[in-house]
Image: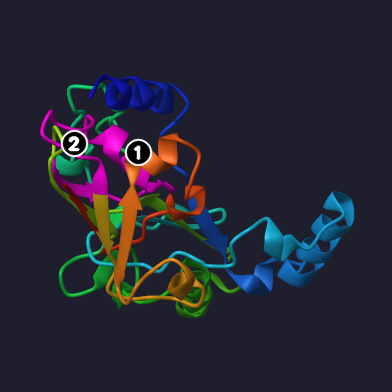
């Protein structure tokens, strides 16, 4: 048990829980294309960009807090969306970092999938990427501002979650608002209880290409003892929204 706690302490010291900010501007307002940016980055790094970055863009979901602004006109939120600390951000006994309460301007995606904006009212946004939303809003605001430059920002992700169950100090539902691996997740929950055997099961409903290399069906079996001995390191995968982690 001591080796579990010591290893987790080291992991926690090396993990910086940083809330990433995602934003997009309507594509008509960006003279440099994404293809040009990727080509130049590949030239500078001397390798294919696809090996170093993910091409997946955040998809807006229910409960997310978004920022919408028009250049020269400011924030388009119809009302302030004050934030409070969220259950999944409660720090465990091991001292996992928690997100502070947030009082930033923004507009919350309601249960019906809509947001309320100045001058154009309710707009349905669930299922869109930030770029798609910026392009959509540019067209809507064009009737008011002529040729608006619209920027959309993910202020806080509330729709993407994962669940941790079993023999950890603080099981529960956590918000997936930064990249996190299986081992980092155990550290975030405060570590194993004294009855844990280090065997972890990850249940993933929606598999993507490449998952079949590690998953047996929809199940990934992770052995913490093997991991800390330097084996099966590739099984320490990054979690995705909807994942269920069961600690035995």
Image coordinates of residue 212 in percent, x first then y, are 44, 75
Q: Locate the N terminus by quadrant.
A: top left
In the rendered image, the vertical position of residue 67 relative to residue 148, given as above or below: above
Residue at 44 percent across and 48 percent down: it is 179
> Which numbered marker is on residue 225?
1
Image coordinates of residue 2 in percent, x first then y, are 26, 19
Tell how many labels. Answer: 2
- Looking at the image, can residue 79 be seen? no
- Looking at the image, can residue 51 be seen? yes
172 or 65: nearer the viewer: 172
Check if residue 211 falls in the magenta segment. no
Q: Secondary structure at mark 1?
A: helix
In the rendered image, the vertical position of residue 108 relative to residue 208, given as above or below: above
234 or 24: nearer the viewer: 234
In this rendering, the label closer to the viewer, 1 or 2? 1
Residue at 43 percent across and 49 percent down: it is 236
Q: Give the residue number, with chain letter if any, for mark 2.
A: 85
Q: Quadrant of residue 110?
A: bottom left
| Stretch of the chain drawn in magenta | 171-199
The crowding category of the residue bearing disc 1, from other C-alpha atoms within 10 Å (few below 14, some 14 to 19, many at least 20), is: some
């Amino acid at each position: 048990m001591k080796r579990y706690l010591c290893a987790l302490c080291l992991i926690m010291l090396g993990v910086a829980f940083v809330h990433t900010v995602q934003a997009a501007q309507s594509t008509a307002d960006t003279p440099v294309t994404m293809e040009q940016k990727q080509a130049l980055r590949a030239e500078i790094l001397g390798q294919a960009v696809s090996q170093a970055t993910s091409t997946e863009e955040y998809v807006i979901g229910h409960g997310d807090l978004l920022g919408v602004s028009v250049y020269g006109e400011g924030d388009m939120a119809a009302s302030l969306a004050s934030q409070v600390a969220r259950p999944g951000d409660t720090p465990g006994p091991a001292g996992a970092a928690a997100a502070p309460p947030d009082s930033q301007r923004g507009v919350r995606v309601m249960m019906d999938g809509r947001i309320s904006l100045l001058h154009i009212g309710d707009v349905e946004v669930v299922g869109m990427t930030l770029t798609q939303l910026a392009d959509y809003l540019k067209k809507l605001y064009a009737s008011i501002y002529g040729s608006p430059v619209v920027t959309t920002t993910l202020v806080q992700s509330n729709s993407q979650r994962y669940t941790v169950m079993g023999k950890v100090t603080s099981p529960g539902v956590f918000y997936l608002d930064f990249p996190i691996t299986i081992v980092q997740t155990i550290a975030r929950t405060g570590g194993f209880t004294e009855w844990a055997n280090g065997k972890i099961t990850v249940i993933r409903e929606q598999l993507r290409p490449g998952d079949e290399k590690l998953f047996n069906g929809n199940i990934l079996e992770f052995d913490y003892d093997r991991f800390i001995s330097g084996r099966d390191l590739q099984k320490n995968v990054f979690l995705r929204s909807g994942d269920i982690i069961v600690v035995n």
